[in-house]
Image (cartoon, rainbow, N blue to C red):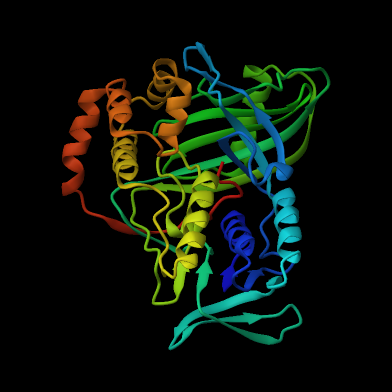
Amino acid sequence: MVIVGGGAAGLSLAHRLTETGSTTVTVVEPPDGSLRPPERTWCYWDRGPGDFDEAVSASWSRLRVHGADGSEVTVDPAPLRYRMVRSAQFERLVHSRIAGFPGGRVLRATVDAVRNVADGAEVHCTAPDGRALTLCARHVFDSRPLRVLPPARTLLLQHFRGWFVRTAANRFDPAVADLMDFRVPQPRHGLAFGYVLPLAPDRALVEYTEFSRTPLTTAAYEAALGHYSREILALGAFTVEAAEQGVIPMTDARFPRCVGAAVFRIGTAGGATRPATGYTFAAVQRQSRAIAAALREGRKVVPPPHGRRALAMDAVLLRALDTGRIDGPDFFTGLFRRTPPERLLRFLDGATTPWEEWGIGLRTPVGPMLRTAVELPFLPRRARPAPRIGERPP
């Protein structure tokens, strides 16, 4: 078994496959240099102990949303907690687990091509010293970002820049994460919000995020972050210790998961990013467990990371946001204000029943959403170049 890419999707699948001890696993990661992405942040919610607790750098029991009018909604989604994983810690943890499995290894090389062949697949690579390598496997799982997105009716981008800040005085409540703060100036198209993950009373990840069609320049993100940190959060004196920046596609495209008989796409390339939120890490875990189970049972299949109902609802929401039929800040603030928090997080994770989803739908702007649902089947799908996939699915 060969896994191309050592990000969240590739390493999560490697972890699941080595757990079973039933196959050899080679993870091919880019060598040090420009091809290796910088450290990223992945966030998700979960209940109870998890498989990657050793890599969790912070977690929060309460979540907060600030409306554009300054109103505040704070919820406790128990038994769920919101968790942060930094990619470097996650990589060290999974690498150590792979190293403890006799059939597991991590190979640093640049992947040039992946091809189906008569009895499986081949991965053609270039080693750091320039040598050509060919890996043969029964199955190859490819997590590399796509260069062109599949045809879609709607494509928004979730684009962001974040600062890891340290303040001169205690300014943060480490028990509360701000998921969406709509007090920032709103763009003419789409929506914008602040995002604050406290790491200590004087340290936090502070981000500025937009859902819109076009990313900003780094200078524009810096200006927005400066305004948010100084004018809205009133942090006082602070220093920026590190930064992260990225772009995540939010699209109703249908992502093919099978590329020939022996090559499969996983992660964002396989449709794991939730279209309406950008969350990916939890879906990657579901997909990895399902792939490992399918292989144990002798089935060559990559199950979908999201259910059809969830994708259909996301397609309607994306179109309604893109057309401006609904007000984004009011929509998301209203969801948190009117929906039981544990149920809402399960809904965002695609784990609710049709009856629960019906109840949540009645708490949204019904008229604009119905109009959008009726028009969607008649809209053409168009292929678009993929954005530069970001440092974080958040």
Q: Nearer the viewer, residue 121 or 303?
A: 303
Q: Quadrant of residue 103?
A: bottom right
- The extreme right residue here reads 168
Residue 146 in the image: x percent, y percent? 47, 63
Identity of the residue drawn at 65% across and 19% down: 233
Quadrant that contains the N terminus: bottom right
**In the figure, 266 relative to 90: above or below?**
below
Residue 88 in the image: x percent, y percent? 73, 51
Q: Nearer the viewer, residue 294 or 143?
A: 294
**In the figure, 1 relative to 211: above or below?**
below
Q: Nearer the viewer, residue 311 or 239?
A: 311
Quadrant that contains the C terminus: top right
Identity of the residue drawn at 28% across and 28% down: 355
Left or right position of 11 against 95:
left
**In the figure, 307 relative to 118: above or below?**
above
Residue 155 in the image: x percent, y percent? 37, 47
Residue 21 in the image: x percent, y percent? 63, 67
The answer to whether one can see residue 310 in this image is: yes
Left or right position of 321 against 113:
left
Q: How many marks?
A: 0
The answer to whether one can see residue 387 in this image is: no
Q: Nearer the viewer, residue 248 or 230?
A: 248
Q: Quadrant of residue 214?
A: top left
Left or right position of 100 against 299:
right
